[in-house]
Image (spheres, helix red, strand yellow):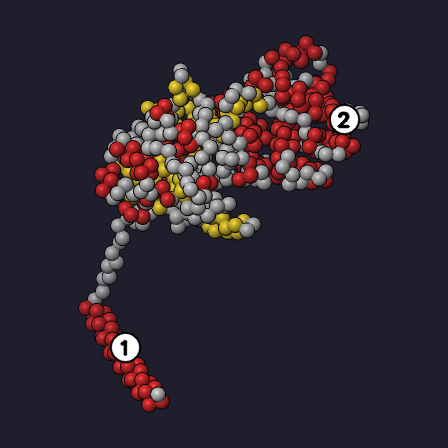
């Protein structure tokens, strides 16, 4: 069942992309808005029918719940919608896909289509809107026909979209779980969640990395906890942690400067039954204007995950951060403005400090960092590592393989923090030699197998030791090693031991002596030949 509906769902996405291409919007900057909004409209439309079927068998037994909807009175429809779960969008009968499908012969159909989207967004704004740092609301939908530059083609464009949506049903997917939706979401956004998405927009965090981070952070049942990502992107890390905790056991908080990534994150929350957290999604600059405040102070969180931007020019507001009121948050300092290559300013160092400051008393964090941080000796790098080690919150470091991120060759590691840690030990894992490398377009990509993922997770959670792969050392040993967090520096190189008989030893000894004599003879021959060449050269001169 899952494979069949998965293929059908991916086919729908491909068909929507073909519509965009047919109307000149293929690879257009607005294509992602059209695809994600049309997909989400269909999902919410069918989710309404699914939930109505759970309330009243009439909507479950009929082939088209939308046709059954026409038969009931408006008061009865209102009573039913009042009983719907809070995570279900409320649509009027005129806003359903079936109604629009049956109305597409009307003049100005694009206006009818756009109006339905805008009205759905406005009537459901209280549940499905995300906010900016200045508290402006970003609703679910906007008119999509406007992206077709030729007004005479807008009606046909909207008809093509509605025909694709009407010929598909999401009804089978509502019983599916996280793994299904994670795969569909990745397929949906694979062409759109790249570095062109915004100033902080990072590459899609690979599922293997997200899974490892979630499993090492959450290794026991937790309830009523908060999960935060200050550079959330499309939310892959957050979804994995929420799934590991149980979607009903946690509340999600996030911030990201990219409007496109924030919209994708909202879609991710809707697909993964985390609608209750949408109002905590903020679009804005986390470093300059952190948005989550509790009683006048920055909120503290139980779990934090982050794959922050590594390098970025933040010179425009750098001096604002280097003020006394920010000293607690940026305890190690703010990187100086570079004379050249300002876009190489190490903004990730600010994110690490922000994350440490934002941890609750029982907080845990997993952060993707460039490997340069592990051995870095700048003042800021050293102060951050000293805070981690002196405070005994550094739980471990996992070095990841090269090309684990398809669009960058930067070597990365996962730094794990844990304020509940009771021991004085640090775990080191070197997973840099794992994975299978293959070509992804013009890039190399390294993918961990499921067995390799499990190997890393188990080694970290159990604190196991394996030659040249995993070890556990004391905090003091790390300090003595100049605060280096490079796993390779803490492995003992195994000594090779050979067990041979006396007879085998004598044979090897004889063979070695024979080889030495041969090499000496070869050397003497070379010396004679060189001497003859020198004499010949002098005679000729």
- Residue 479, picture quadrant: top left
Q: Residue at x 40, y 16 (%)?
A: 296
Which residue position is annotated with label 2? 109
**Left or right: 46 as drawn, with respect to 508:** right
User: Which of the pair 439/495 is nearer the observer?
Assistant: 439
**Left or right: 106 as drawn, with respect to 63:** right
Residue farthest along the bottom direction in this orientation: 539
- Residue 221, picture quadrant: top left
Residue 268 visible? The answer is: no
Which residue position is annotated with label 1? 519
Q: Residue at x 62, y 32 (%)?
A: 33
Look at the picture and state if 25 lies above or below 269.
Answer: below
The C terminus sits in image quarter: bottom left
Q: Where is residue 40 shown, x and y percent of the image? A: 62, 28
Asked if labels 2 and 1 touch by Cβ distance under 8 angstroms, the answer is: no
Look at the picture and state if 267 lies above or below 508.
Answer: above
Mark 2 surroundings: few (<14), some (14-19) or many (≥20) residues within 10 A: many
Q: Where is residue 346 shown, x and y percent of the image? A: 41, 39
Q: Where is residue 335 shown, x and y percent of the image? A: 38, 36
Q: Earlier in the sequence, mark 1 or mark 2?
A: 2
User: Which of the pair 200/497 is nearer the observer?
Assistant: 200
Which element is circle 1 on? helix
Q: Where is residue 264 shown, x and y percent of the image? A: 56, 31
Label tally: 2
The N terminus sits in image quarter: top right
Mark 1 surroundings: few (<14), some (14-19) or many (≥20) residues within 10 A: few
**Left or right: 388 as drawn, with respect to 434:** left
Separation of residues labelled 1 and 2 (CA atoms): 90 Å
Residue 531 visible? The answer is: yes
**Left or right: 384 as drawn, with respect to 54:** left
Residue farthest along the left direction in this orientation: 502
Q: Residue at x 35, y 46 (%)?
A: 430
């Amino acid at each position: 069942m899952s494979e069949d509906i998965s293929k059908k769902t991916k086919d729908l996405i491909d068909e929507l992309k073909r519509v965009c291409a047919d109307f000149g919007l293929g690879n257009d900057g607005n294509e992602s808005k059209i695809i994600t909004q049309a997909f989400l409209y269909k999902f919410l439309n069918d989710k309404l029918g699914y939930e109505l079927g759970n309330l009243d068998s009439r909507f479950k037994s009929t082939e088209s719940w939308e046709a059954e909807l026409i038969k009931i009175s408006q008061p009865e429809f209102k009573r039913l919608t009042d009983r719907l779960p809070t995570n279900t969008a409320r649509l009027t009968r005129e806003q359903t896909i079936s109604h629009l499908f049956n109305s597409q012969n009307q003049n100005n159909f694009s206006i009818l289509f756009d109006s339905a989207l805008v009205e759905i967004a406005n009537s459901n704004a209280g549940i499905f809107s995300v906010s900016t740092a200045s508290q402006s609301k970003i609703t679910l939908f906007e008119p999509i026909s406007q992206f077709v530059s030729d007004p005479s083609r807008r009606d046909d464009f909207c008809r093509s979209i509605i025909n694709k949506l009407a010929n598909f049903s999401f009804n089978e997917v509502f019983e599916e779980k996280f793994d299904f939706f994670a795969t569909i979401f990745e397929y949906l956004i694979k062409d759109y969640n790249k570095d062109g998405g915004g100033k902080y927009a990072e590459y899609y965090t690979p599922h293997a990395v997200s899974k490892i981070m979630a499993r090492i952070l959450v290794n026991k049942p937790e309830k009523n906890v908060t999960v935060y990502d200050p550079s959330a992107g499309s939310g892959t890390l957050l979804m994995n942690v929420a799934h590991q905790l149980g979607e009903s056991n946690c509340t999600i908080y996030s911030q990201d400067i990219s409007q496109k990534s924030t919209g994708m994150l909202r879609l991710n929350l809707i697909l993964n039954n985390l609608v209750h957290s949408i109002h905590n999604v903020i679009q804005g600059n986390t470093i300059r204007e952190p948005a989550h405040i509790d009683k006048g102070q920055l909120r503290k969180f139980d779990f934090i995950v982050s794959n922050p931007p590594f390098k970025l020019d933040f010179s425009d507001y750098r001096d604002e951060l280097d003020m006394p009121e920010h000293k607690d948050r940026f305890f190690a300092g703010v990187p100086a403005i570079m004379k050249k290559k300002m876009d190489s300013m190490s903004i990730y160092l600010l994110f690490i400090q922000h994350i440490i400051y934002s941890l609750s008393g029982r907080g845990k964090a997993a952060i993707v960092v460039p490997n340069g941080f592990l051995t870095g000796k700048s003042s800021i790098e050293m102060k951050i590592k000293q805070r981690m080690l002196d405070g005994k919150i550094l739980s471990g470091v996992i070095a990841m393989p090269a090309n684990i991120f398809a669009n960058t060759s930067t070597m990365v590691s996962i730094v794990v923090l844990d304020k509940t840690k009771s021991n004085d030990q640090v775990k080191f894992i070197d997973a840099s030699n794992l994975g299978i490398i293959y070509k992804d377009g013009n890039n190399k990509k390294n993918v961990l197998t499921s067995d390799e993922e499990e190997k890393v997770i188990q080694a970290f959670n159990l604190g196991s030791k394996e030659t040249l792969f995993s070890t556990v050392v004391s905090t003091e040993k790390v300090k003595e090693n100049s605060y280096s967090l490079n796993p390779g520096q803490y492995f003992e190189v195994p000594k090779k031991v050979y067990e041979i008989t006396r007879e085998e030893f004598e044979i090897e000894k004889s063979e070695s002596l024979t080889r030495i004599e041969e090499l000496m003879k070869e050397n003497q021959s070379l010396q004679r030949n060189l001497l003859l060449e020198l004499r010949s050269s002098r005679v000729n001169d």
